[in-house]
Image (cartoon, rainbow, N blue to C red):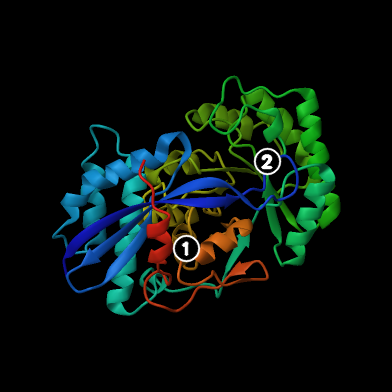
Amino acid sequence: MKITDVKIYIVDAPTAVAGTGGAARGLDRRRTWVLVKIGTDEGLSGIGDASQPAGGGTAISSRILDVLRESLIGEDPANIELIWQRLYRRFTFTGPRGPITRAISGIDMALWDIKGKSLGKPVYDLLGGPVRESVPLYTHPALGSPAELAESSRQLVAEGFTALKTDPFMAATDGITSYMNGQISVSGVERGAELIGAMRDAVGPEIEILIDVHANFNVPSAIRAANRLEQYDITWFEEPVQPDSYQALRQVKESVRVPICVGERLFTRYDFAPILENRLADYIMPDVCWTGGISELKKIATMAEAYYVPISPHNVQSPIQIMAGAHVMRTVPNFYRLEIASLQMQIYAEAFDRPLDISDGELHLPDRPGLGIELNMDYVESNSVIV
């Protein structure tokens, strides 16, 4: 079998909002997906996701994929590891992680999808077979007032979710991509604590609460905020500081009494090795769209298993990302939960050939070959844009 075609689709999709300013407001914001579809001379095709819209990531990812397109034509799609290594090593002089691994991720997912289809097996069977029947999830309540957060959390628990994540400090910090000094006011910390207190009262002691602070803090602010939330028995405190200083992360880790989770903005096993070796996190959360695809996510999970550190993939893109991460996690003993944006189920169902099978807070994978989902090409083509 040979690769004959690589198509790149930039899809403009509405995004459900669970942010500040009130209860969930439906689909009122836009997010672009960078999707890959690889065709072969035997009529099989595979799909992948290379999305990351922040900071101009859509244009960067799509351009890199366009550069790589010709090098894939004529390759045997079954040689997944060989193709991964060739693409990654090609950029060792310019820096192979970040935008490069995003492009590789989309290609890698599509190749695994093709391999599964060619063998008549779901991807999880090719990765060693399942160790669990379904994939536990966590999701996000709508973040508004304490009362609104409490009500949204109660609704999600009623739907069967047993773990919820939010950023209670978002309104008091610089924003996800506009970090300046990492400070937060005393009133900002107290406002965040009020939100999480209301959330804990609403869901009770058995529901896990995960805190994401989007790397918005400097070291003392992260320590103060994390310790303030300790009384609410939070499961983790995510991305306390910017990802470019292991020493800052170490200082936070050694100064707080809550578990730390990092990894959304780390790339490949080479970035995760020092996190594990130096005991800098209690959970890791690589993104299958950013770190190198299915191949690399499996390697990172296996490496973390040796340190008895749970893995919980980051997910905020398309259902391809969700399914790719889920196939890997179904085979991983040290898996915690998979992230999902439950408010986006409507758009997921429109953009793909079938809705995700979610019940009681868990994702159930089909036994269809490959990733188990296909693009709705009518939707993709009618919502494709040029950047």
Q: Which residue is pictured at 71% across the width and 67% down the height?
A: 160
- Tell me, yes or no, if residue 247 can be seen here: yes
Q: Amino acid at mark 1?
A: Ala
Q: Is residue 338 left or right of residue 86?
A: right
Quadrant location, the C terminus: top left
Q: Give the quarter of the figure containing the N terminus.
A: bottom left
Q: Give the distance between the C-alpha atoms of the residues marked 2 and 1, in whole angstroms.
A: 28 Å
Q: Residues within 10 Å of mark 1 (few under 14, many from 20)?
A: many
In the rendered structure, the answer to whether residue 69 lies left or right of residue 330 reads left
Q: What residue is shown at x 52% (from left), y 27% (from top)? A: 247
The image quadrant that residue 185 belongs to is top right
- Where residue 150 sits in the image (x, y, percent)? 81, 51
Q: Answer above or below: position of 71 versus 111.
A: above
Name above or below for residue 10 compared with residue 95. Answer: below
The label on residue 351 is 1
Most foreground residue, 237 or 68: 68
Name which residue type carries label 2: Asp
**Which residue appears at 16% of the width and 60% of the height?**
75
- For label 2, the residue is 167
Q: Is residue 262 left or right of residue 360?
A: left
Q: Residue furthest left?
A: 74
The residue depicted at 41 percent of the width and 46 percent of the height is: 290
